[in-house]
Image (cartoon, grey):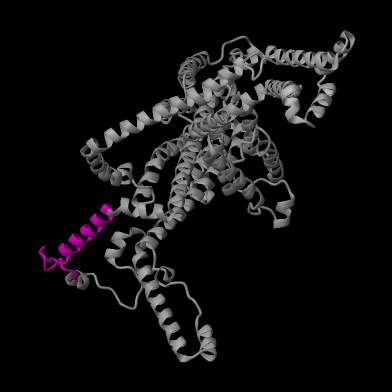
């Protein structure tokens, strides 16, 4: 089943399947009115009608569904037989009635439509094969790059592949013992015997047989890299010489001893991490080998992509031309070119030019089914694929039963503690929600509903009663001591309401001059009680003012009380949301996929800038809008294929169409380098910033 990219790339290559009407038959009478060769014409028309019916049935069967290689293989013998029968019929007719032979436009159109259908199908299958291979190889190279970039991943990879490496070493030992006709016993398997059997030159850095069995990639290297064996150099002689001139000899000896110890420890450390360094080299070697294979597939893919324009012009050319005409020869030439590209042939003369479309069709049918098989066999033979799933998970499978057994055996210790922890957590959450969230919120609602009419510090009635009592006590004293008239009493009552007790204070000032006499016979006691009542009224009024202030800010205090709990709840749900967002994938497929989009778009721009020159000079190529070379074109298509898959799987519908439109502009082989660079700039501008930042990660 072709991928979405192949369907998009070849959707304009569907040949016309309309069935033209047959031309009117030529006259079979001579100038005197007598018939000329009637039997020959009737026989030729009958065979032509049978061929057209067979061709039409074959075309209908090909149009019913997507044409596969099996369909082509079943249809090719039929087409070959029909072409041979027509060629034989045309030859016989031309020898007998050459002057009445007329080309059949309908039969020509049917043959051309069938050949075009098969050509487009083979072209699509070739694109699909090489895109699939290049994508697989690039994914494997990225996996090796991720492993090589992390020391922990390298250690894990070495542990995962350790059993297979040990098996390779044992197999090599057994094979070598059998080839030397040595017995299988403990003496032959001793380290000294194995060292004598597999010994190499001590002056050579060429890896031995056992080493290459443990690290298979070393068989492709002439010798071990000295950077693996030697530590980083450090020039300490000049420093030691300077120190020796400025310090005493004891300090110099201590410093040299310290450097020798550090050097020894460094060698020891390098010896222990040597397997990890060689494993890292293996990952790097596999990555580079896969990148070379990817470039080979990308070059073929670029050549196939550049064939779309001539194929499109060939498919959409006018029908009604004979089989041996120019259009059919163009189809045959195109099939020869396609076979040369698919078979990795570098020179056009490596495959001889075909006189019929049947031969290149047969060659492609024989070549294309073996491409994937040969590709997979080569990768497996070179050990370039990542280890199998079982190889990668066997350490976890070994650890899981032990951990599960330990957890099950200690369940009586941790299950009660876990239950108590859950109970404490439940009580804590309930107490927090009820005491610090629900009740304060209900208090806020109650404050809003009551509107400052709740409990008060001092009631208005109490303040009024105390003030009236003070007024009566003051008026009584003024009436008895000062003999005020009713009008003066009314004026004094108004002053008391305003807080002015000047007359009473004057009496109090006179009384305290003779306190004992005034206390026994005067008004000192009454005046003191009035002062106490006045202080009580002042306190009541102050509390009433404070109460009014509190009532005016009651809603503020309520929200201040519930704000910390709301902040805790907001922080909790925010963290939970970010955790769920991270686990289920964030916007546009997640940060990792958006980084992949950024890397591929950056590679597209780099390929467009650094494409190899195809003209007379580099400056001409950089300044002109010339076509792109096959290798950059293939790498571009590879990146665009993965970008298209990402867009179809992760982008929403409101921006997916525009993103795919930009990718379609980059996929257009008719656009040159400068036009595609402008498209890339538009993508950076539109998709790298703002709310629809697909590229930003």
Viewed as shown, does residue 452 lie left or right of 284?
A: right
Q: Is residue 72 above or below residue 394?
A: above
> Quadrant location of residue 75?
top left
Q: Quadrant of the N terminus?
A: top left
* Count of marks, rendered view: 0
- Residue pictured at 61% horizontal, 39% vertical: 695
Residue 150 in the image, given as x and y percentages of width and height: 44, 54
Q: Which residues are magenta?
A: 163-191
Q: Is residue 256 left or right of residue 654?
A: left
In this rendering, the answer to whether 428 lies above or below 594 is above
Residue 29: give x, y in percent of width and height. 60, 12
Closest to the observer: 143 or 360? 143
The verdict on residue 167 being magenta is yes
426 or 542: nearer the viewer: 542
- Front in this rendered view, residue 169 or 88: 169
The answer to whether residue 419 is seen in the rendering is: yes
């Amino acid at each position: 089943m072709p991928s979405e990219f192949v369907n998009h790339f070849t959707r304009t290559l569907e040949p016309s399947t309309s069935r033209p009407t047959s031309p009117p038959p030529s006259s079979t009478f001579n100038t005197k009115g007598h018939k000329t060769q009637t039997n020959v014409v009737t026989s030729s028309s009958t065979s032509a009608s049978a061929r057209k019916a067979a061709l039409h049935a074959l075309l209908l069967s090909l149009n019913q569904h997507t044409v596969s290689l099996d369909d082509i293989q079943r249809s090719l013998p039929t087409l070959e037989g029909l072409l041979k029968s027509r060629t034989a019929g045309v030859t016989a007719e031309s020898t007998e009635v050459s002057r009445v032979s007329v080309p059949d436009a309908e039969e020509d159109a049917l043959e051309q439509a069938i050949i075009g259908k098969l050509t487009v199908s083979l072209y699509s299958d070739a694109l699909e094969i090489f895109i699939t291979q290049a994508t697989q190889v690039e994914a494997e190279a990225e996996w090796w790059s991720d492993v090589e970039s992390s020391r922990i991943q390298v250690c894990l990879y070495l542990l995962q592949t350790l059993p297979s490496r040990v098996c390779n070493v044992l197999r090599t030992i057994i094979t070598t013992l059998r080839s030397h006709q040595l017995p299988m016993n403990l003496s032959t398997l001793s380290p000294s015997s194995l060292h004598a059997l597999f010994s190499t030159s001590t002056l050579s850095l060429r890896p031995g047989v056992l080493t290459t069995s443990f690290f298979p990639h070393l068989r492709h290297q002439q010798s071990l890299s000295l950077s693996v064996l030697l530590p980083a150099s450090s020039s300490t002689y000049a420093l030691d010489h300077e120190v020796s001139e400025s310090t005493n000899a004891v300090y110099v000896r201590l410093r040299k001893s310290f450097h020798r110890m550090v050097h020894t420890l460094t060698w020891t450390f390098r010896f222990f991490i040597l397997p990890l360094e060689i494993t890292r080299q293996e990952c790097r070697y596999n990555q580079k080998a896969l990148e070379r294979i990817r470039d080979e597939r990308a070059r073929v893919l670029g050549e196939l992509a550049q064939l779309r324009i001539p194929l499109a012009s060939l498919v959409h050319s006018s029908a009604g031309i004979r089989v041996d005409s120019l259009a059919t020869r163009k189809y045959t030439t195109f099939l020869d070119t396609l076979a040369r590209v698919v078979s990795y042939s570098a020179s056009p003369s490596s495959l001889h030019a075909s006189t019929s479309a049947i031969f290149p069709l047969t060659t492609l049918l024989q070549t294309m089914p073996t491409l994937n098989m040969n590709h997979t066999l080569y990768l497996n033979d070179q050990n370039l694929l990542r280890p199998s799933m079982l190889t990668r998970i066997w350490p976890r499978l070994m650890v899981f039963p032990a951990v599960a057994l330990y957890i099950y055996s200690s369940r009586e210790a941790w299950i009660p503690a876990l239950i108590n922890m859950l109970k404490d957590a439940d009580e804590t959450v309930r107490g927090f929600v009820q005491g610090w969230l629900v009740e304060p919120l209900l208090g806020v609602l109650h404050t809003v509903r009551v509107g400052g009419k709740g409990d008060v510090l001092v009631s208005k009635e109490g303040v009024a009663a105390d003030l009236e009592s003070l007024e009566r006590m003051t008026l009584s004293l003024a009436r008895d001591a000062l003999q005020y008239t009713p009008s003066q009493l009314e004026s004094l009552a108004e002053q008391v309401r305003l807080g002015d007790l000047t007359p009473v204070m004057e009496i109090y000032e006179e009384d305290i001059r003779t306190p004992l006499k005034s206390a026994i016979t005067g008004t000192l006691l009454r005046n003191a009680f009035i002062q106490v009542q006045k202080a009580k009224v002042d306190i009541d009024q102050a509390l009433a003012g404070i109460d009014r202030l509190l009532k005016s800010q009651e809603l503020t205090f309520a929200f201040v009380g519930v704000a910390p709990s709301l902040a805790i709840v907001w922080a909790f749900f925010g963290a939970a949301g970010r955790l769920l967002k991270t686990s289920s994938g964030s916007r546009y497929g997640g940060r990792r996929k958006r980084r992949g989009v950024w890397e591929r778009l950056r590679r597209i721009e780099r390929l467009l800038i650094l494409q190899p020159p195809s003209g007379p000079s580099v400056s001409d190529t950089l300044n002109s809008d010339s076509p792109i070379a096959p290798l950059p074109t293939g790498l571009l298509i590879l990146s665009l294929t993965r970008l298209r898959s990402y867009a179809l799987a992760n982008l929403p519908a409101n921006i997916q169409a525009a993103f795919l439109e930009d990718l379609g502009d980059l996929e257009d082989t008719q656009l040159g380098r400068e036009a595609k660079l402008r498209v890339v700039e538009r993508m950076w501008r539109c998709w790298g910033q703002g709310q629809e930042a697909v590229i930003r990660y």
